[in-house]
Amino acid sequence: MSQHFRLPAGGVIARNEPLAFAFNGRRYQGFRGDTLASALLANGVHLVARSFKYHRPRGIVGSGSEEPNAMVRVGTGARVIPNAVATTVELYEGLRAESINCWPSVEFDLGALGNVLSALLPAGFYYKTFMWPNRAWMAYEYFIRRAAGLGRAPYAPDPDRYEKRFEHCDVLVIGGGPAGIAAAGAASESGARVILADENPAPGGQLLYSEERVEGLAAREWCENGIRELRARDEVRVLTRATATGYYDHNLVCLLERVTDHLGEPPARLPRQRLWKVRARQVIVATGAIERMIAFADNDTPGVMLAGAARRYLGQYAVRPGSRAVVFTNNDSGYDCAAALAASGVRVAAVVDPRPTGAAAARAAGRGIRVLDGCAVIAARGGTRVASVLAAPVSADGARIIGTTEELACDVVAVSGGWDPAVHLYSQSGGRLAFDGVQQCFVPGPAVQATSAAGAANGAFHTEECIAQARIAGLAAARHCVDPSAVGPVAPRRTPLAVTPLWEAPAHARRAKKFVDLQSDVTAADIALAAREGYVAVEHAKRYTTTGMNTDQGKTGNVVAYGILARVTGRTIPEVGTTTFRPPYTPVTIGALAGREIGGALDPLRRTPMSDWHVAAGAVFEPVGLWRRPLYYPRAGEDMSAAVERECLAVRQRVGILDASTLGKIDIQGPDAVVLLDRVYTNAWDDLAVGRCRYGLMLREDGMVFDDGVTSRLGERHYLMTTTSGGADGVLGWLEDWLQCEWRDLRAHLTPVTANWATVNVAGPRARDVLARLESTIDLSAAALPHMGVSAGSLMGVPARIARVSFTGELSFEVNVPARYGLALWEALTAAGAEFGITPLGTEALHVLRAEKGYIAIGHETDGTVTPLDLGMNWLVSGAKADFLGKRSLARSDTARAGRKQLVGLLTLDPQTQVPEGSPIVSAANAGRVGRPPVPVIGHVSSSYMSPALRHSIALALIEDGRNRLAEEVAVVCRGKPVRARITSPRFYDPKGERLHG
Amino acid sequence: MAERLAARTALADASPRALGAPGAVTVALMAARGMLDVRLDPQAPGACERAREALGIALPLRPNTRSAHDGRAALWLGPDEWLIVVPDGEEAAVSVQLSEALAGMHCAVTDVSDLRAAFEVKGARARDLLAKGCAVDLHPRAFRPGELALTALARVRVIICQTAQDPSYEILVERSYAEYLWHWLEDAVTEFGV
């Protein structure tokens, strides 16, 4: 393959490892060490993409993560990366990439019609145009959204593995250029734990290809020595391909490590990417600087690139970015590029410099390079590849053309508008920024966290200064870890890189497009328009024009935008200020953020000791908190309602068995345990005898019910509280809060013991018969163990506690054994119950059974606005107690008033119609108005089931003044239609509770 | 014929009991032990002395540490809370001894032998494995044998306790999460080879 633009020698590439790749279906060759961008340029390919909004042809502008233009789709099938940046995609054998945002091809794109229609698409166009007719926006939006945007994501699930991990260190150095290597070296001298993270495949930054000598060594040798030394130190970790994407509070920095992205087929064992959450005592930001563009007419033409990028292609990749170059610079760094181009055999047509002749220009002229001083490039020409530029003398402020235009033929334009320290992470840390008027850039100011900046990120653009400054920063950071009060010296900057501001070059054509943000297609005129329309605040101008809002976050254009905004509003750049730097610095895959918390591991999952049995029995599960509880156990051919009906009837007629291990359990011990119970429950506890249990309601201070459960008295000073399955942690926290903060005098200890016990509920008329089959020291007779009695002893050789509590209204035993015996107990009970037809029941049947009895369920009948009185449970609210949590709130005028929503039963007139839970209820008189709002709603359905025992649908509801409306007919609104129903008592089944005492 | 209920481990019957990459990191479910949760005011006169006599080990007063001796261990869980770990089957007797020794004091001794499962994680990459789900710094400079942390591993409440310099860690997790955490460890260990 050709690689016509590859230099015969040099570069940091493995020429003995040629790699074949395809771009837009055409086959090319590059070398190991190339990026997709450098390999394309080596093959003379500049046109790689179409732009976001106008679909203009676009080329490669940068050489790293600052790249605004060269977005491509990489990979095949489910491994497609839709918006990869070609300058950061490492080449691998067989890589396949395509241009995005174009159809049918990048050379001929129908979407470019948008460029012709661009007058309809000014800044903020979505607020102004496409407004008529009003309701057509939905249609316009469809086409606008299709036309805009980036690559398409694959539909198939992501096949790759992603991981996350935490890490800690004394000093985290972000960026592995000369400053980063020096800082990490100095910081680790004394043995500090240091992490050096660099986003490139190898650290070194510019030193990888720089011609300069550093401390007497060739630049690359200096940097290789430094890295070797670092890697040899025990407590130093050097991470490559790791981008610091976000800087958060307490020196938490996220690093995205691309572990296998550079390999075609990733090894199965390794994650594709790993997100590091690093907590560092000190952070040194050594992220270098990013060159910026100058806005001139058609500066987006492929072939126009940043001067530093052109140098990097020459030096690191041994690629000539073209054959004939024009350099356009407002600072001395552009001359280095011109020299490098000339040395590599690229013909330099001219260096165009708006400044008067200076020393650098004189040196270049001395080497035979033509310098057009006092001039600017005012336009690029060429369409899909630059063919020439127009240069003209400009006024000292760069605003006007003051002489004759000259056309310079060229196929590459290297632009330097100055350098911006990469202060993104420093700013995210909370650090202030200051404007450096000499270098025309924002530099780090006072830090807020334990952060410092060094090197080009700190505005030091000369290698030796970078290194000197970084060493001091590294030593200071390590010392700070030992002695936080230590203040280290800061190396002064000596030689600034003087920049004469030129944000926007003048142009002949009035409608010329001078791009500021290439990725969002924002022009200098857009910024001016925003300012004219009043969006002068930088954050407003950003949002109105979308400058800096694309995936590159405006790395090469934001400061240009601030400069233009300052000029058109007559302010200085510091007066304009910057927009907020937000994470992520570069895009982060969702996969890396999710890590392994996907699929079944999305949430932690809690199991009871009997979970295996339920699975084997074919149970259908439902989530309850983090638990999965059997919802029902279908038999062959049964649907949910058939299974639930069978389970319900088994309990009413014979016996059922329920895994109740998920119930929260809190062991309470101490002389004041009963006082605690008295204060947190609404009813009285001082008369509860040992061996007895009692049901209680817990209220918040606002008087609203938030949990319920049965508490047993196990000993003189010993109680066991049960809570709802989902409420266990909340109740424990609530009680501890009161004990530790408000009632410090109470002597009561709480110990959560939920998972220590396996809990099996055996319920139904034959429950005692089943339990009696198991050998036990516990007397199960009604006399020894009455309803709401509890007894401890031994059951089949293991310690057990049996309580007579019932949530079904049937004779019911709750058997507790240590968790390790739970499965064996369950199996023993099912075996012993076989002759009685024992039936496992799930939570749905349990709900039907409790609703038949009118028992409330927290979260159904309560929603944080319901008092015990609303529930008709005044009998549970002690009038005698001096106080309990929520008592005072029950006397508030609103909670005490008549007519509040009250718990009632509801029977539909048609016994087979079941109303959905949550359905609103309206008065019968308003039934005819359903569907024609507003209709006054008088309540809602809180529970609704088909009752197998009654052969009738039943519902519980909260209805205004419900208890005074018994027998009244109402209408339940079901999917917009009224369903007639009658208000009843909530106790549908065995209202006198005789079955409990069996 | 006194048939006794069979005990099961905290893991599903189908789960293996050990996994890992030899030479790098191994993970094993530890056998059941007796565990007692003890609540006691260490400032109460004689409290610590009486506890030590009954237990044979001192209740550690330094936060996040563990004392161990002769098969028994005491883990600091809070300013007035410890977890006592004894060989399987001894918990009932120890509970009685301790309760008697502390008679008359405001305290709570609760048998929690079935509340938690324990995993042993050890090997050169043990720290790298735990770092995937635990935000606590386990570096030898920050975390030493005999120290413990009440923290989250893979978003689940755990007690992580370093038991040997090698390093070796003991992870105590509420029994209901054991199977989940086991699967998490099984997955996390993939990278180190199996």
Image (cartoon, coloured by chain):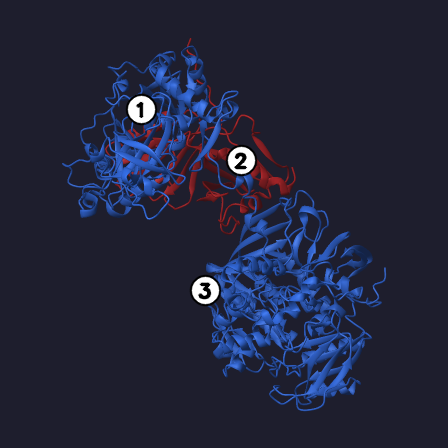
Chain colours: A blue, B red
Q: Which mark is residue A484?
A: 3
Viewport quadrant of the C terminus of chain A: top left
* Residue at x 51%, y 24% (from the top left corner): A618
For mark 2, what is the residue? B182
For mark 1, what is the residue? A806
What amino acid type is highlighted by mark number 2? Answer: Trp
The x and y percentages for residue A233 are 62, 57
* Residue at x 29%, y 45% (from the top left corner): A936
Q: Which mark is residue A988?
A: none
From this view, report whether residue A653 is shown above or below residue A491.
above
From this view, report whether residue A296 is shown above or below residue A900.
below
**In this figure, what is the number of numbered marks?**
3
From this view, report whether residue B133 is shown above or below residue A942.
below
First in sequence: mark 1 vs mark 3: 3
Answer few, some or many: residues within 10 Å of disc 1's Cα (few below 14, many 20 plus, some between 14 and 19). many
What amino acid type is highlighted by mark number 3? Answer: Pro
Pointers 2 and 3 in contact (C-beta within 8 Å): no
